[in-house]
Image (cartoon, rainbow, N blue to C red):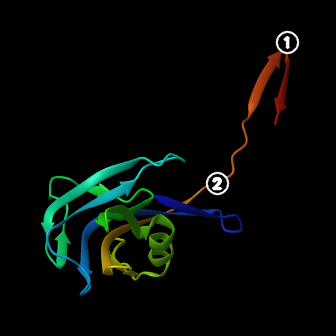
């Protein structure tokens, strides 16, 4: 979830981002049979990654959609990890910032929902990540606390 606050209007806009699917189309240099992993970047400054999916003996085109019972929200991004020439390589497929920028320009339906796609060129091909976005706008009113104290027969109102 990401959000923006407009100081002038007092309106906060939130985008709830959910992963609908990932497709990676590997170019001609790809050797079928490789093992790939799709990872979600973890919160914070750590290099932790949460495994989304692993495929052994990956074909030239990879399609992945999360199970219907498992709604995956986009945290910091999705990356692909694969072995190339004996070295582990990682490439970002989508970042939260990219998704947020697209979400701000998306066309929303009557349920305040939109579907967006983020495409990227990789060193081993191209990728597309499909996201479902829910848009929520709230107005935040500035409130001051009001304290009333009574002393004898005199009542003071402090703001």
- Front residue (pair 39, 27): 27
Of mark 1 and mark 2, the one earlier in the sequence is 2
Against 75, is 58 above or below?
A: below
Residue furthest top in the image:
152
Residue for badge 2 = 141
Residue for badge 1 = 152
- Front residue (pair 38, 10): 38
Provide the secondary structure element on which disc 1 rests: loop
Label 2 Cα crowd, 10 Å radius (few <14 / some 14-19 / many 20+): few
In-image side of 131 versus 25 (left or right): right
Provide the secondary structure element on which disc 2 rests: loop
Residue 117: horizontal and vertical position, in percent? 34, 79
In-image side of 14 versus 112 (left or right): right
- State the quadrant of the C terminus: top right
Question: Which residue lies at the image location 32% right of the left edge and 57% below the top edge?
Answer: 39
In-image side of 86 versus 43 (left or right): left
Against 71, is 128 above or below?
A: below
Distance (Cα) linking label 1 and label 2:
35 Å
Does residue 17 appear in this view?
no
Please tell me in which quadrant of the rendered image residue 151 appears.
Answer: top right
Residue furthest front in the image:
85
């Amino acid at each position: 979830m990401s959000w923006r606050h407009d100081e002038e209007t007092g309106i906060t806009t939130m985008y709830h981002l959910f992963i609908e699917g990932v497709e990676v189309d590997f170019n001609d240099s790809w050797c079928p049979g490789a093992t790939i992993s799709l990872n979600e970047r973890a919160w914070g400054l750590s290099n932790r990654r949460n495994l989304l999916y692993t495929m052994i003996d990956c074909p030239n085109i990879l399609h992945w959609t999360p199970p219907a019972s498992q709604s995956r929200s986009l945290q910091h991004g999705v990356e692909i990890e694969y072995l190339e020439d004996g070295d582990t390589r990682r490439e970002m497929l989508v970042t939260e910032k990219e998704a947020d920028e697209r979400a701000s320009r998306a066309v929303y339906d009557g349920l305040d929902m939109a579907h967006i796609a983020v495409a990227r060129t990789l060193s081993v091909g191209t990728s597309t990540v499909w996201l479902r976005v829910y848009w929520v706008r709230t107005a935040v009113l500035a409130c001051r606390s009001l304290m009333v104290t009574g002393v004898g027969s005199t009542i003071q109102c402090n703001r």
